[in-house]
Structures are given as C-alpha cells and as structure tokens.
C-alpha cells in the first residue's frame, strides 16, 4: 500500500457520511414515535406525552448519543490522521540560518 493515507482519508469521509445518515434516521424515527404515541391528546396531556416520549424514553437522548459517538469517532480518527502524516525526509534543516551579508 503505497498511498494508504489517501484511502484513510476516504475512510474518514465515509464514516462521517454514515454518521450523518444515522443521525437523520434517528431524528426521523424520534419524531414518528412521538407523533404515534401522542395521537389524539390535547393541551397539557399532549405536552406531557411529548416530553415523556421525546426526552425521557430516549427519543432525543438517542440523537444526543449518536452525536456524542460521532464526535468521539471523529476525534480518534482525526488524531490518527494527524499522527500518521508524512514527515520531511531532510532532517538537517537549519532553523536559524545566518543572516545575509
């Protein structure tokens, strides 16, 4: 594998795309679950039902968990990407060259 870093970059982009699809799917399923469970309720009952199904029973909690997992995965992949970068082969670089005459 001569240029594995290019493939690793595409892998990182693929992981991010999959997390985006997962976040959209979880968000859509959360709104459907709340709408189905609270159908036919009005006023305070509807507000209580949406709070319970949306926040307590994991509707928005699942979405927050997906975003936290996404951030953790990006952090790990980003650190790996930075650590494995190509280094300069010329190690004899003079950082303080003499001033021009």
Image: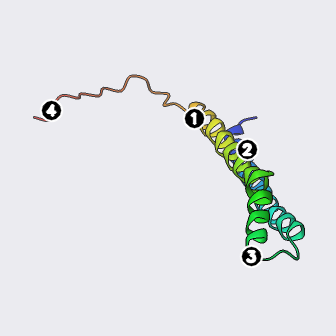
Q: Earlier in the sequence, mark 4 or mark 2?
A: 2
Q: Is residue 2 above or below residue 59?
A: above
Q: Pick the residue in front: 100 or 4.
A: 4
Q: Where is residue 2, by image quadrant?
A: top right
Mark 1 lies on residue: 85
**What is the C-alpha distance between the residues marked 3 and 2?**
54 Å
Count numbered badges in the picture.
Answer: 4
**What is the C-alpha distance between the residues marked 4 and 3?**
79 Å
Q: Pick the residue in front: 57 or 62.
A: 57
Mark 3 lies on residue: 43
Name the residue: 88% across, 74% down. Answer: 39
**What is the C-alpha distance between the residues marked 3 and 1?**
58 Å
**What is the C-alpha distance between the residues marked 4 and 2?**
43 Å
Q: Residues within 10 Å of mark 2 (few under 14, many from 20)?
A: few
Quadrant occupied by the N terminus: top right
Q: Earlier in the sequence, mark 3 or mark 2?
A: 2
Label placed on residue 7: 2
Q: Residues within 10 Å of mark 3 (few under 14, many from 20)?
A: few
Q: Are marks 4 and 2 in contact (CB under 8 Å)?
A: no
Residue 63 percent across, percent down from the top left: 74, 54
Name the residue: 78% across, 56% down. Answer: 59
Which marked residue is nearer to the observer: mark 4 or mark 2?
A: 2
Q: Earlier in the sequence, mark 4 or mark 3?
A: 3
Q: Where is residue 42, by image quadrant?
A: bottom right
Label placed on residue 99: 4
Residue 22 percent across, percent down from the top left: 80, 55
Q: Are marks 3 and 1 in contact (CB under 8 Å)?
A: no
Q: Is residue 11 above or below residue 33?
A: above
Quadrant occupied by the C terminus: top left
Which marked residue is nearer to the observer: mark 1 or mark 4?
A: 1
């Amino acid at each position: 594998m001569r240029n594995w870093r290019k493939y690793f970059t595409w892998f990182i982009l693929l992981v991010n795309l999959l997390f985006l699809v997962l976040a959209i799917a979880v968000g859509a399923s959360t709104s459907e679950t709340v709408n189905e469970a609270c159908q036919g309720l009005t006023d305070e009952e509807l507000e209580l039902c949406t709070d319970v199904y949306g926040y307590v029973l994991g509707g928005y909690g699942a979405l927050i968990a997906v975003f936290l997992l996404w951030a953790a995965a990006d952090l790990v992949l980003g650190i790996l990407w930075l650590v494995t970068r190509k280094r300069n082969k010329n190690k004899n670089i003079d950082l303080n060259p003499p001033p021009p005459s």
